[in-house]
Image (spheres, helix red, strand yellow):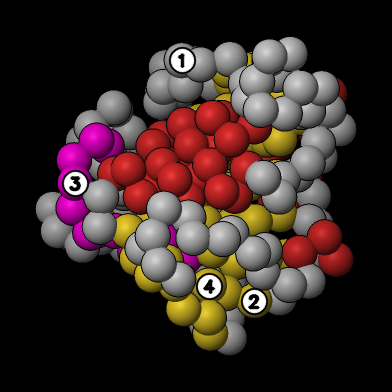
Amino acid sequence: MSATNQPPQANGSAGANWEKTYTATTADQTHALGACLARVLDAGDLVVLSGELGAGKTTLTQGLGEGLGVRAGIISPTFVLVRIHPNLPDGPRPGGPDLVHVDAYRLGSAAEVDDIDLENTMDTSVTVVEWGHDRVEHLSENRLEIDLHRAIGLDPAPGVDGGTAAGEPGNLDFDTEDTDEPRTIVMRGYGPRWTAAPDLGTAGGNH
């Protein structure tokens, strides 16, 4: 896996403190990046994931769960808005935060996000929101936004999260993310919590 640093770009990253791009060539590398990122996450942190079908959002979240030491079984939450994975006392981070995994695809506004009461769990959990762009930013000024892009496969059209417009068929995030193909993963940090990019070590490859 390789990584590059660059100033935030103008397209959709206004207010970002920094921007870092990773290139993952396998699903295992995407998973490993999530596991490395988990080491620097604490209770109260918000991670917003965007990307087309099969881009690796759930694979990255599975890596986060492994690194946080939460209960296994992380799958795409397409048909369940919120899944809570509790911290395991015999895991790598006993006493650490739970993982709250959210699918905001069917939530059309910030008001609908408020209806699921994420505020009640944010202080004690790491909250990961798939399809969260333009829906959950009001929850915290401190957040990581991660965009995942497939190098081959679907050609995203303008719309929600770089994919097809919300509500169009064929854009749901089923578990089709385990294929080995190149992915570009762009991470941005917002707020005083993320004034500098975290050091993710080797993240399963060379940086």
Secondary-structure class at tag 3: loop
- Compared to residue 147, the image places residue 167 above or below, namely above
Secondary-structure class at tag 1: loop
Cβ atoms at labels 2 and 3 below 8 Å apart: no
Q: CA distance from mark 2 to mark 1?
A: 32 Å
The magenta region covers 177-186
Q: Residue at x 29, y 27 (%)?
A: 174
Residue 87 or residue 148, whichever sits in front: 87
> Is residue 88 one of those drawn in magenta?
no
Q: Residue at x 86, y 32 (%)?
A: 123
Residue on which disc 2 sits: 18
The type of residue carrying mark 4 is Lys
Residue 187: image quadrant is bottom right
The type of residue carrying mark 1 is Gly
Residue on which disc 1 sits: 73
Residue 196: image quadrant is bottom right
Residue 112 in view (yes/no): no
The type of residue carrying mark 3 is Asp
Q: Residue at x 51, y 45 (%)?
A: 34
